[in-house]
Structure formats: structure tokens, C-alpha cells
Image (spheres, rainbow, N blue to C red):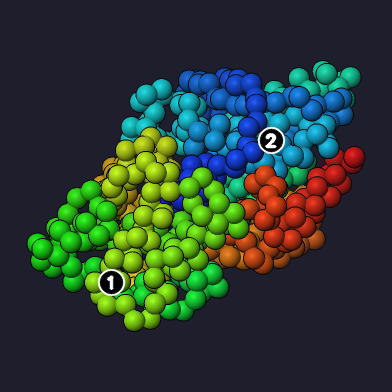
């Protein structure tokens, strides 16, 4: 399968899994909460299936006072504790607004498993949809609001949804579809237009290349472009395969076309990850401005590298990314379906959230087209069905014809996902732009190295929230 066929799956996963909750954790993120559960239907939209399951959520009422709102995070594809530890903006705003903080886990992720240990089998995946997840959140919000109303002298409590990336999409969509449940939504780096017919398939990678050019310069990009052929040449002989395994710190030899395709795909994913993580301060083993470090500290900015020296530099650079936690002994390029959370997300990417990706000829990457047929066959191989259409989110949520009210969309212009984001304000929704940031830096806790644009956006967010809850 081509790299473009894989890219929608992994590029989306890396945004939230790698960025929000795994690779980097804020050093001052030490937030506390109670873990609770609410029983919800497995199927909210049918009376023929009466099964229920327990949805997990985290709650902190330390700062709540009568009249204060509910700050509600619409969980995305991962364990909810990790989101709670990394969305510092909510924790920092809560005292000012006397807010209850709630992080709701997404069904089929973490411990919110509709069918227990059998949840991730092909047979049981059918209830993993955005509409079912939103209905879970609405049920939880109704319960929270009822309890809040009791404590608030029988006066209704308002709620504000927060979400980043896929979670940001859900935050916007819950406000669109269930406006009585939340009074407003903050949707950070939410690519709600990253679907067929709404955004060109090359947009993501074009922005990625632009971000690399700004951070690292043209020479590094040209050297990266050279490596694709260098890698192909080394895989053409058994001796070259051994050298490649050693230099790139691979767990296994790259012996055939399938191995080579997987390696090239993994490397494309790495560059996307580095661009997402290109923050102005160190994060748990990754240096500040990792794109620049990737290039400059490994000689990839040298225009006179031979193929051998280029491969050496490339291998050193890869270690900056792959061993950021000092726990990775070698790179397993085939390890993509072992984690249950990953498997659930791949399923969503094969059903509703089909986001076409391709690469036009540019200074960094090999050209690659979007092949829906190949992608559908990949889905069939892993889940037993072929993807049959690419426009389900547009039908469900309206695409660019939808009218959002009381939603703030924030985007960094160095974030490849902003190509599928909302960049212009409308009569009732607001777009806030950060010209010099990567993926939803505004949602993280404050840091001395935060750009001015991020600090300003956070203040604007506070202003909008204040207007929605009338404080």
C-alpha cells in the first residue's frame, strides 16, 4: 500500500496520541481528580439493543462555587487521564470562573469499553461512531447539570466544551448538534474540513514542508529528499540491508517491498510528528524546536554530504525522535496494531473519519497519490469490510455549510492540520490564529517560552467564555 493510503490513519493518530498524551508531558502538570463512572446505553439510537456500559470520567470540584460553570473536555482516542494531565488551559482557567472540571472518556478507549475485553473485535466495533460518542457526552452532561442545579439553589448550570484535534472536532460538533447541552465550545486545532471535497489531499503535507522550511531551511529539506533514494539503494543488497538496519536503529532487516513501504511510511509519520511537536521548550526528552534540532545537530544542514554520511546523519536524527523517552532500543516499523486504543482509532479512520492525504512533488517528499481503492482494501484486511464512502462527516455535520454558534476555533499556522481547520470567523463563531505555533500549543499549560500569539489567544478564549456564561 502507498504511503498516502496509510497517512490518514497515522497522521491523525499522531496528532492526539503522540502530541496530547504521550511523548511530552508538561513538567508542572500535577492535577488531581476523582475517577467516576456513569452507565450509558451501548446504542443510543435503537430500542432493539438494551445493553449498557460504564463510561469513565474524571472530575475536580475544588474551584466550583454556586453559579460556576462546568468545563467539559470531550475526550478523544486515548486514556482520559493523559488528556487531563496535558490540557493545562482548563485547569488554569477554572479558579477564575469557579468551574467544575470534567474530562469525559471516549467510548472504546481507556477503560470505557462497551463489551469489556471483547470491545476491539471486528464484530463489536459497530457502535464506535462520533454520534454515539457525542450521545454519551450528552448523557453525562445531563447528569452533571442536574447535580449542579441541586447545589446551585435550583438554578441551571452552564457548560463549556473543550477539545483538541479530534477532541476539538467533537467539541464543535456537540455544540452544533446539541446546543442545549453546552453553551459554547473551544475547539483547538480541529480539522473539521479535512474530508473529501472540502480540503485538497496535499494540503497537510504542503504545510508540513512549509513548517520545515521556516524552522530548518532548504538544505535540510533537500537532504531529506535525497534519503528516499539512498534508502532504496541500500535495501537492494543483503549487505546494504544490514547497514541500513544498523544506521537507522531498526529492529529487523528491510528485506522486501512490503518492509520498504512500511519503513518509508514510518519515516513520513516521523516528520509529521516532529512538526506537530515543534514547540519552543523541551518536552520530556524532546528538545525545544525539535525540527531545527533534528536538522542542525545531525549535519543534515550540510550541503556536501555523501550518501554514506547522509545515512549516518539521518540515523542520528531519527534517534532524537524515536528515543525521546530513552526507552526505545530499536525501531519496530511493523508495530502499528498492537495497542487497543490504536486499533479503535484505525477503525474510526476506516469508517467515518476518512481523511484523504497525498503528496505532490516538493522539496522533502516523494510524490504520492491518494488511492481510495487501496485504502479500502487495507480496511478490509484489518476489519473485514471495505470502506464504501468518504463523506459521512459531511452528511452528519454539514461540512462548510454548517452554521456554528458560540464556537471558538483556534489554529497555529505551523500546524499541518490547520489546512482542514476553520480559519475565518463567521457571524456567530470565531477563528483565532497563531502565526508561529504548531499543534494546539494554546491548550497546554503556560510556559515562559510561549509565543505572544499563544498568550493572546488564551486571553481571547477567556473573554469568549466569560461572555457565554455572563461572569
Residue placed furthest toward the left: 238
443 or 153, which is in the foreground?
Answer: 443
Please report contact status of discs 2 and 1: CB closer than 8 Å, yes or no. Answer: no
What percent of the width, then of the height, locates residue 161? 70, 40
Position of 223 with respect to 420 (left or right) is left
Residue beneath the point at 14% across and 65% down:
240
| Residue 309: mark | 1
Q: Is residue 383 above or below residue 456?
A: above
Quarter containing the C terminus:
top right
What percent of the width, then of the height, locates residue 216? 50, 71
Position of 26 with respect to 407 (left or right) is left
| Residue 72: mark | 2
Mark 1 neighbour class, 10 Å CA radius: few under 14, some 14 to 19, many 20 or more = some
Position of 275 with respect to 262 (left or right) is right
Quarter containing the N terminus:
bottom left
What percent of the width, then of the height, locates residue 336? 32, 45
Front: mark 2 or 1 = 1
Earlier along the polypeptide chain: callout 2 or callout 1? 2
Amino acid at each position: 500500500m502507498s504511503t498516502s493510503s496509510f497517512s490518514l490513519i497515522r497522521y491523525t493518530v499522531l496528532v492526539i496520541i503522540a502530541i496530547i498524551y504521550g511523548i511530552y508531558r508538561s513538567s508542572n502538570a500535577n492535577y488531581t481528580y476523582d475517577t467516576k463512572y456513569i452507565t450509558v446505553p451501548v446504542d443510543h439510537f435503537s430500542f432493539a439493543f438494551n445493553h449498557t456500559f460504564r463510561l469513565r470520567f474524571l472530575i475536580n470540584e475544588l474551584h466550583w462555587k454556586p453559579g460556576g460553570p462546568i468545563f467539559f473536555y470531550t475526550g478523544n482516542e486515548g486514556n482520559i487521564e493523559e488528556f487531563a494531565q496535558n490540557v493545562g488551559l482548563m485547569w488554569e482557567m477554572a479558579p477564575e470562573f469557579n468551574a467544575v472540571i470534567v474530562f469525559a472518556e471516549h467510548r472504546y478507549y481507556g477503560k470505557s469499553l462497551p463489551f469489556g475485553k471483547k470491545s476491539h473485535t471486528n464484530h463489536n466495533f459497530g457502535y464506535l461512531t462520533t454520534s454515539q460518542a457525542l450521545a454519551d457526552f450528552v448523557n453525562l452532561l445531563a447528569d452533571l447539570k442536574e447535580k449542579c442545579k441541586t447545589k446551585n439553589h435550583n438554578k441551571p448550570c452552564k457548560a463549556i466544551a473543550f477539545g483538541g484535534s479530534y477532541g476539538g472536532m467533537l467539541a464543535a460538533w456537540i455544540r452544533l448538534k446539541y446546543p442545549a447541552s453546552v453553551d459554547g465550545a473551544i475547539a483547538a486545532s480541529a480539522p473539521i474540513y479535512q474530508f473529501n471535497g472540502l480540503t485538497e489531499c496535499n494540503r497537510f503535507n504542503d504545510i508540513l514542508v512549509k513548517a520545515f522550511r521556516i524552522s530548518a531551511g532548504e538544505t535540510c529539506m533537500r537532504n531529506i529528499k535525497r534519503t528516499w533514494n539512498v534508502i532504496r539503494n541500500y535495501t537492494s543488497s543483503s549487505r546494504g540491508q544490514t547497514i541500513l538496519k544498523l544506521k537507522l536503529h531498526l529492529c529487523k532487516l528491510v528485506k522486501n517491498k512490503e518492509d520498504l513501504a512500511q519503513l518509508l511510511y514510518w519515516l513520513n509519520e516521523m516528520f509529521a510528528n516532529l512538526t506537530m511537536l515543534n514547540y519552543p521548550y523541551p518536552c520530556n526528552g524532546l528538545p525545544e524546536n525539535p525540527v531545527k534540532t533534528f536538522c542542525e545537530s545531525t549535519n543534515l544542514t550540510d550541503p556536501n554530504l555523501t550518501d554514506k554520511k547522509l545515512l549516518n546523519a539521518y540515523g542520528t536524527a531519527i534517534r532524537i525522535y524515536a528515543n525521546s523517552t530513552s526507552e526505545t532500543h530499536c525501531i519496530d516499523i511493523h508495530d502499528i496494531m498492537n495497542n487497543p486504543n490504536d486499533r479503535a482509532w484505525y477503525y474510526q479512520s476506516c469508517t467515518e473519519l476518512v481523511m484523504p492525504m497525498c503528496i505532490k512533488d516538493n522539496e522533502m517528499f516523494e510524490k504520492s497519490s491518494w488511492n481510495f481503492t487501496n485504502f479500502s482494501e487495507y480496511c478490509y484486511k484489518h476489519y473485514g469490510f471495505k470502506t464504501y464512502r468518504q463523506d459521512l462527516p459531511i452528511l452528519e455535520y454539514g461540512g462548510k455549510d454548517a452554521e456554528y454558534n458560540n464556537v471558538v476555533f483556534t489554529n497555529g499556522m505551523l500546524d499541518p492540520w490547520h489546512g482542514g481547520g476553520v480559519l475565518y470567523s463567521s457571524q456567530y463563531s470565531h477563528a483565532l490564529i497563531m502565526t508561529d505555533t504548531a499543534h494546539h500549543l494554546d491548550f497546554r499549560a503556560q510556559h515562559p517560552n510561549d509565543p505572544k500569539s499563544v498568550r493572546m489567544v488564551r486571553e481571547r478564549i477567556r473573554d469568549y467564555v466569560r461572555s457565554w456564561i455572563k461572569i
